Image: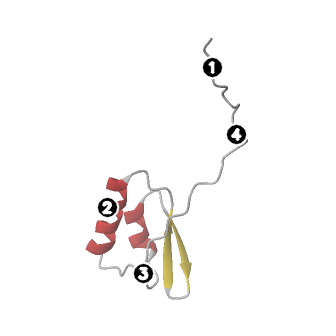
């Protein structure tokens, strides 16, 4: 978002982290589904904040991959 979002306004984005940089604030966190995303976008609009962009970052692997499953062969 453009500008610096105040600590007071940050409370409107529970569960998300705000990263403040020079004249910009990034809202960082997990968006669980489309409804959650639309809710965040509506809140940004309702608070009169200016959205600069939306970036999707895929989740990183949280650990080693599980065991591979073998296909069962039918005889």
Label 2 vs label 1, nearer the camera: 1
Horizontal arrangement in the rendering, residue 35 relative to residue 53 (left or right): left
Residue 71 image point, x, y percent:
63, 25
Q: Residue furthest front?
A: 75
Quadrant of res 74: top right
Q: Residue furthest left?
A: 46
Q: Residue furthest bottom?
A: 23
Q: Earlier in the sequence, mark 4 or mark 3?
A: 3
Q: Residue at 39% of width from left, 72% of height from top?
A: 9
Marks 4 and 1, how far apart at CA: 21 Å
Label 4 vs label 3, nearer the camera: 4
* Disc marking residue 38: 2
Marks 2 and 1, how far apart at CA: 43 Å
Residue 24 image point, x, y percent:
49, 83
Quickly name the residue at label 4: 65
Q: Residue furthest top?
A: 75
Q: Residue at 46% of width from left, 73% of height from top?
A: 7
Label 4 vs label 1, nearer the camera: 1
Q: Are marks 4 and 2 in contact (CB under 8 Å)?
A: no
Q: Are marks 4 and 1 in contact (CB under 8 Å)?
A: no
Q: Are marks 1 and 3 in contact (CB under 8 Å)?
A: no
Give SS at disc 4: loop
Give SS at disc 1: loop
Quickly name the residue at label 3: 52
Marks 1 and 3, how far apart at CA: 51 Å
> Compared with residue 55, is residue 52 higher up or lower down, i.e. above or below?
below
Quickly name the residue at label 1: 72
């Amino acid at each position: 978002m453009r500008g610096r979002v105040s600590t007071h306004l940050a409370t409107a984005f529970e569960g998300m982290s705000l990263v403040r940089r020079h004249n910009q604030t990034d809202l960082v966190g997990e968006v669980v589904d489309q409804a959650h995303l639309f809710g965040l976008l509506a809140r940004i609009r309702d608070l009169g904040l200016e959205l600069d962009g939306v970036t999707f970052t895929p989740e990183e692997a949280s650990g080693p991959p599980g065991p591979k499953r073998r296909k069962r062969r039918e005889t």
